[in-house]
Every structure is written in structure tokens, then in C-alpha cells.
């Protein structure tokens, strides 16, 4: 009986082991999400996208396969570039028994998460940078249209084309515009068809330009091809391919308006011979008042300007400027330059016309450089004078005349020049100078350098000083309290010559001052600096 019980227990044990083995086999066959245990190595991986757990993978490759699938699902059939926050992390672990997610399950979870984090759809675009200005266009055709419109504002004959070439000065792929005449483009294409494939576009352009140089010979006016000779963009233009959202892409019509419209910018103009404020203002479409307001050196419309003075002027300019050179023909009456004969014995205020001018006539072909509508320079290519202009000849002095300063500091103007009511018996009713009321003892200085011709008592003047000056004028200082110079003494401008007082025919302490020209008194206030 005991023997049979032992046999039974062994059979049960064998049956149990067999059943367990069958279960294990079935798990292996029908439960692939269970990972096998591998001692010492990661056999399970937690997958996170944007710090959110999206599943557990058996291998790192499965995690990245799901991630790639999710990105493809997000892009779908869209041709644009799609942006989404996507920070994938995979953290390994080692377990004896663990369950993993399928690739398809992780793909679905990642797809949903990427869609929730989708930022925007990016379109292929072209960014144009012009100095500090930039604009983004949707395609290369819009870029070409913008550049062509900017060029056509000055290319009235539609003789020039614009193309895009790689900028050799940049390490990255940056395009820049190249402007060539249609004739040059045709020659380049003809050369390209006949040359070896390795010949470069730049070599073709160089050859065309060299061949275009005219031969040197004495040409007639009819031999010149008038019009635009050369064109290019005056500003540096860089064009790069980019991916941008719709909100940052400008339609081509708006872009053209932004790039070609005039904006006001301040420029410095150097005054040329013959310029006046009115002429300068007219040249830059300004009023004289506006020109005065923009320049602190100008007080009003009567302010003096000199050759090579710099004036600020407002010039309208587009964002993208065009530089071009044109060959122009014109006929004109012209004036010869004024000729001067220096006279070293005359003052600069003296001059005399020796010969009156008469205009000449000439025909001219001139090469003019422009930036937009502003002339930058010109070179005469051919000039033919029909009849010569006769120059104006002027004899002029070279000696700088002396200047005159107020002979005292401060003081109150108490009596002007000319007719007045006599302030005191014996005083003249016609005042031949000016009076400044000032305390006795105020320093009196020479109004200009000269030689003292009188120093002492002068009847009605009281104590006085007379000074003769190099330009023939004479100054007089009256009613002094003390004389500090003597007859025949040379004095310099600003040198102290006396002290003010109240001597002679005087109603109170003051300085009487006169300026005489050819012996006659003139209003001193008209001559003081």
C-alpha cells in the first residue's frame, strides 16, 4: 500500500513538471511581450517623449523605430517642414520578468503626443537681406520679380537682366544678384555652349566684359552708344534658403513696395563753387527754411556758405539702391572760370572788373555715375567747343583789412549816431559818434591797431585820443579821465590806451567814440565786430 502511494506521488510530480513545461512553452510562443532575463545586461527600456512615458521597449532600436514612425505620421503627406517639440529619452533596466509594449502601440502614443506639441508648419522660403533690412519671400520666382522691379525703375529700355550666383566671399551657400545686359547674357550663353563643361560661369562673364572694351580711337559724336552702360545693385544683397511659418512670409507685392519705396535719410553735401542755399535746397527738393533747420551752422537764409563746407541734406532713398553709369549727350552755353589778378597793395574788400565775360557754346558726351536718381560723378568723354567763352577778369586785393571792436567792456549805449536834442548847452545837435555810459576809470582799448596821432586835451572832447589805422580810417575816443599813450606810438587792437571819464562838454561819465572815413564821421556801430 505504501509502495503504491509513492508511485502515485511520483506520477503527480512528473505530471506537474510536464504541465509547467507546457505552460512555459505556450508563454514563449503566445506572449511575446514578456522579456527574457539576461544577467548583467539591460533587457527592458523605459521610453519617454518630452518627459512623458510612452511605453516600455525590449530594445533601444524598437524605441527609435516607434519614434521614426510617429514623425512620419505627423508629417503625413504635407510637403512643408513640420515642427514639434520632440525630446526622446530611453532609460535601460534589468528585470527577471517584465512586460513590454509593441512598436505599434508606442508609435500611436508618440504620434498623439507630437501632434499635441506641434508648433507650426514651416514652408520653404527665401530670405533676402539688404544691409540691415530683410524680407522673406515664398519662392525663388518672387525673389527674381522683386529684384527685376527694383532694376526696372532705372532700366527704362529693359536692356538688363538679373540672375542669381553663389557669393564666393561666403563659406555657406549664399546667393547674390548679378546684373548683366541682355547682350552680355547672350554672349555668355554662346560661349558656354562651345566651351568645355569645366569652364566656369565667372570665366565666361570675364571674357565677355574684356571683349566689350571699346578700341581707343578718335570717335565722332555719332559713334557713341548713348544710354546706360553698366548697372548693379549699390547695396549688398544676400539670399538664403530657409524654412519659415506662413506668418513670416511676405507677399511679393508688399515686399516690392517695402524695398523700392523712398525713405528719407540724412546725407552730407559738400558746398561747391557757385552754390547758394537756394540752389542747394532746390537740388534736394527742400525749402531753404528746412535746410537751415537741419544745419546748426546756418542762422538764417542769409547765412554765408563757403566752398567745401559740409551741409546736412535729407535725401529720399529706397531700401535697395541701384548704381548705374550712363553715357549722355548735351549741348549747352557755358561760362568760363573767372580769372583773378591779385593786387598786393589793395585790401580784400577792393576789386575791379578788368574784362566782362561772354558765354561760349559746346557739345559734350559725358559719362555720368548715378545711385538711384542722384548724380555721384561725371567724366567728359568728348567735348567740342563751337565758340569759346570769354572769361571774366577781376583785379582783387590780397591784404586782409583791419577789424574794429568795441573799445570798452560793458557800458550802456546812452546816445546813438546822428541827429539828437542837445543834452547840454554847447553840445552838437548832430551826434558824430556814439556814447556808452560807464563809470569813471573804465579801461578804454584801441578798437583796431594803428598809430596815435593825438593824445591830450581836445576842447569839447576833454581828454582824447586819435588813432590812424592802416585802411585809412581814424578812431577817436573822448571825455577821458586819463590818457595812457603818446603821439606817434603804435598800438595793437585791444591795447589799453586810456581811462574813461567826464571831461570836456559832458553830462556825465561816459566814453564818446567815433570812426572817420576820409575825414567824415560814420556810424561806428556799422563797423564793429
Image (cartoon, grey):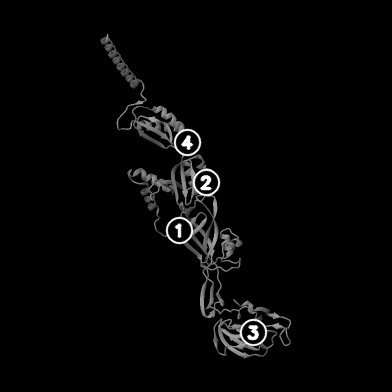
**Residue 143 on image: x %, y %:** 47, 44
Up/down of 128 relative to 78, above or below = below
Up/down of 434 relative to 197, above or below = below
Disc number placed over residue 440 in the picture, else none: 3
Q: Which residue is mark 2?
A: 256
The residue tagged with tag 2: helix, strand or loop?
A: helix
Marks 3/1: CA–CA distance: 83 Å
Disc number placed over residue 117 in the picture, else none: 4
Up/down of 112 relative to 295, above or below = above
Marks 4/3: CA–CA distance: 94 Å
Of the residues under marks 4 and 3, which one precedes in the sequence? 4
The residue tagged with tag 4: helix, strand or loop?
A: loop
Q: Which residue is mark 1?
A: 220
Extreme left residue here? 3
Marks 2/1: CA–CA distance: 42 Å
Which residue is located at x 38 percent, y 53 percent? 210
Marks 2/3: CA–CA distance: 78 Å
Amino acid at each position: 500500500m505504501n509502495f503504491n502511494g509513492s508511485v502515485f506521488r511520483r506520477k503527480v510530480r512528473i505530471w506537474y513538471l510536464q504541465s509547467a513545461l507546457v505552460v512555459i512553452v505556450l508563454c514563449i510562443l503566445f506572449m511575446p511581450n514578456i522579456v527574457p532575463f539576461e544577467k548583467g545586461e539591460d533587457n527592458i527600456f523605459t521610453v519617454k517623449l518630452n518627459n512623458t512615458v510612452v511605453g516600455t521597449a525590449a530594445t533601444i532600436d524598437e524605441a527609435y523605430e516607434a519614434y521614426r514612425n510617429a514623425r512620419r505620421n505627423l508629417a503625413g503627406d504635407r510637403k512643408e517642414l513640420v515642427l514639434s517639440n520632440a525630446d526622446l529619452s530611453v532609460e535601460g533596466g534589468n528585470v527577471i520578468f517584465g512586460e513590454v509594449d509593441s512598436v505599434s502601440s508606442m508609435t500611436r502614443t508618440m504620434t498623439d503626443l507630437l501632434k499635441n506639441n506641434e508648433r507650426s508648419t514651416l514652408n520653404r522660403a527665401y530670405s533676402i537681406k539688404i544691409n540691415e533690412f530683410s524680407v522673406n519671400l515664398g519662392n525663388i520666382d518672387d525673389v527674381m520679380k522683386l529684384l527685376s522691379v527694383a532694376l526696372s525703375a532705372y532700366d527704362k529700355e529693359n536692356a538688363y537682366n538679373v540672375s542669381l550666383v553663389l557669393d564666393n566671399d561666403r563659406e555657406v551657400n549664399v546667393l547674390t544678384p548679378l546684373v548683366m545686359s541682355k547682350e552680355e547674357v547672350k554672349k555668355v550663353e554662346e560661349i558656354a555652349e562651345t566651351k568645355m563643361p569645366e569652364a566656369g560661369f565667372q570665366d565666361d562673364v570675364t571674357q565677355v566684359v574684356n571683349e566689350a572694351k571699346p578700341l581707343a580711337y578718335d570717335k565722332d559724336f555719332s559713334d557713341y552708344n548713348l544710354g546706360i552702360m553698366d548697372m548693379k545693385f549699390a547695396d549688398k544683397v544676400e539670399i538664403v534658403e530657409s524654412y519659415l511659418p506662413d506668418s513670416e512670409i511676405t507677399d511679393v507685392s508688399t515686399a516690392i513696395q517695402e524695398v523700392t519705396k523712398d525713405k528719407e535719410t540724412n546725407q552730407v553735401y559738400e558746398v561747391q563753387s557757385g552754390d547758394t542755399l537756394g540752389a542747394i535746397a532746390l537740388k534736394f527738393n527742400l525749402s531753404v527754411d528746412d535746410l537751415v533747420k537741419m544745419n546748426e551752422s546756418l542762422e538764417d537764409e542769409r547765412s554765408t556758405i563757403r566752398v567745401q563746407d559740409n551741409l546736412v541734406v535729407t535725401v529720399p532713398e529706397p531700401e535697395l539702391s541701384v548704381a548705374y553709369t550712363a553715357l549722355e549727350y548735351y549741348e549747352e552755353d557755358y561760362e568760363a572760370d573767372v580769372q583773378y589778378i591779385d593786387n598786393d597793395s589793395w585790401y580784400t574788400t577792393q576789386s575791379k572788373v578788368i574784362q566782362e565775360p561772354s558765354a561760349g557754346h559746346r557739345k559734350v558726351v559725358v559719362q555720368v555715375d548715378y545711385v538711384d536718381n542722384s548724380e555721384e560723378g561725371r567724366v567728359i568723354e568728348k567735348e567740342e567747343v563751337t565758340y569759346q567763352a570769354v572769361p571774366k577778369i577781376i583785379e582783387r586785393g590780397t591784404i586782409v583789412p583791419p577789424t574794429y571792436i568795441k573799445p570798452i567792456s560793458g557800458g550802456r549805449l546812452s546816445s546813438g549816431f546822428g541827429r539828437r536834442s542837445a543834452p547840454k548847452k554847447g553840445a552838437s545837435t548832430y551826434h558824430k559818434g556814439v556814447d556808452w555810459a560807464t563809470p569813471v576809470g573804465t579801461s578804454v582799448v584801441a578798437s583796431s591797431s594803428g598809430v596815435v596821432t593825438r593824445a591830450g586835451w581836445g576842447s569839447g572832447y576833454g581828454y582824447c585820443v586819435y588813432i590812424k589805422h592802416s585802411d585809412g580810417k581814424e578812431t577817436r575816443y573822448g571825455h577821458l579821465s586819463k590818457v595812457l599813450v603818446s603821439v606817434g606810438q603804435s598800438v595793437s587792437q585791444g591795447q589799453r590806451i586810456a581811462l574813461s571819464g567826464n571831461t570836456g562838454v559832458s553830462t556825465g561819465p561816459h566814453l564818446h567814440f567815433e570812426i572817420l572815413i576820409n575825414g567824415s564821421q560814420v556810424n561806428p556801430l556799422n563797423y564793429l565786430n
